[in-house]
Amino acid sequence: MISLEKDKTAVYILTGFLGAGKTTLLKRILTHASDLSGTVVIVNEFGDVGIDGLLLKDVHSGIVELAGGCVCCALRTDLKVTLKKILTELDPKRIVIEASGVADPAAILEVLQDREFKTLLEVRKVVAVLDPDFWNSREDLGTFFLNQLKESDLILLNRIDEVEAHKVPELLRGIHEEIPDCRVVPTTYCNVDPASIWSQDSALPAPANLCGSFEAPLQADHHNPDHGSAGIRLHTPDAESLGFRAFSFQSAEPLSEACFTKFSEQSPWELFRMKGPVRFHDRTVMLNHVGGRDEWAPWDGPQETRLVFVGLGVNPDETIAKLKKCLKTDNS
């Protein structure tokens, strides 16, 4: 995992085409963060009158609004001036930039890599919000649209409740085929585990119970020793009707690391979330798997595996059966 140097300010960029849901996402993560001290938000509107800043004022007071252009184009100089002022006067721990819907994040990243900022700022994550309708029309939206996705560390495929259930897996596969290195998480109303956004920022922990629609609580199912789908509830009543499934697995026995690595690498795109401590033969580590990639962190809690899974149209029993094979395989 990337470690932030003490003298650098963490930067998070939210991008996505017009109306995809960026402000909804920003409002959610600001509302649910347990500590926003030292956080400054830069909101960029393409028009002359800024609306997003007004919508966010009741959520967080540290809002700086740039209206009348795009931070990667006409407002590039203004962005530099704003960043200098923020760093000089506020010395923040983190800066969140909500880019205009027509911004190219590559240009924003260039500004942040300028010599005057390179030693002061470190980009921690670029998150794109994607409307399925826009993906289907991507050839008509220009190169900046795909650049928004290709430059992102995490893509939220939003509004999947407006897509026929059988088409969502097709969308996921299509996105991964065109952008192989991306992480994709399907959402409605940008409901996402805040840890997916702040996962590299240990100074801003996300409350475990604020997990959004498709994140299950990390808890044991005492009525089912195999910890399948029973006992895990999704946070919104329509989640299961959309095909989302949340289930868990718990075991005190160590897993084969080689076997588990293969299990994770071969997991389908539809199994987009795995989270919890994993016990191997020589250590126990915390796994945060989002949209096809694993992030590992030290773990000093109970020495057992306690994993929560969230997927779309996945079979909990088949998934757990594959995982259990790692209890019987010792390649260490």
Image (cartoon, rainbow, N blue to C red):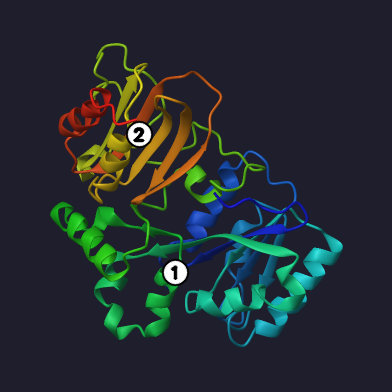
**Residue 88 in the image: x percent, y percent?**
85, 66
Asked which secondary structure carries label 1, the reply is loop
Instruction: Name which residue lies at 72% across and 58% down.
Output: 9
Label 1 sits on residue: 16
**Residue 66 in the image: x percent, y percent?**
66, 75
**Amino acid at dot 2:** Glu
Q: Is residue 140 left or right of residue 61?
A: left
The nearer-to-camera label among 2 and 1 is 2
**Amino acid at dot 1:** Gly
Instruction: Name which residue lies at 52% across and 74% down.
Output: 105
**Residue 278 in the image: x percent, y percent?**
41, 29
Residue 49 vs residue 323, the one in the foreground: 323
Circles 2 and 1, Cβ within 8 Å, touching? The answer is no
Determine whether 323 is above or below 139 in the image: above
Q: Is residue 37 left or right of residue 172?
A: right
Label 2 sits on residue: 257
Residue 4 visible somewhere in the drawing: yes
Determine whether 13 is above or below 27 in the image: below
Asked which secondary structure carries label 2, the reply is helix
**Pointer 2 or 1: first along the chain:** 1
**Residue 191 in the image: x percent, y percent?**
42, 47
Q: Quadrant of residue 260?
A: top left
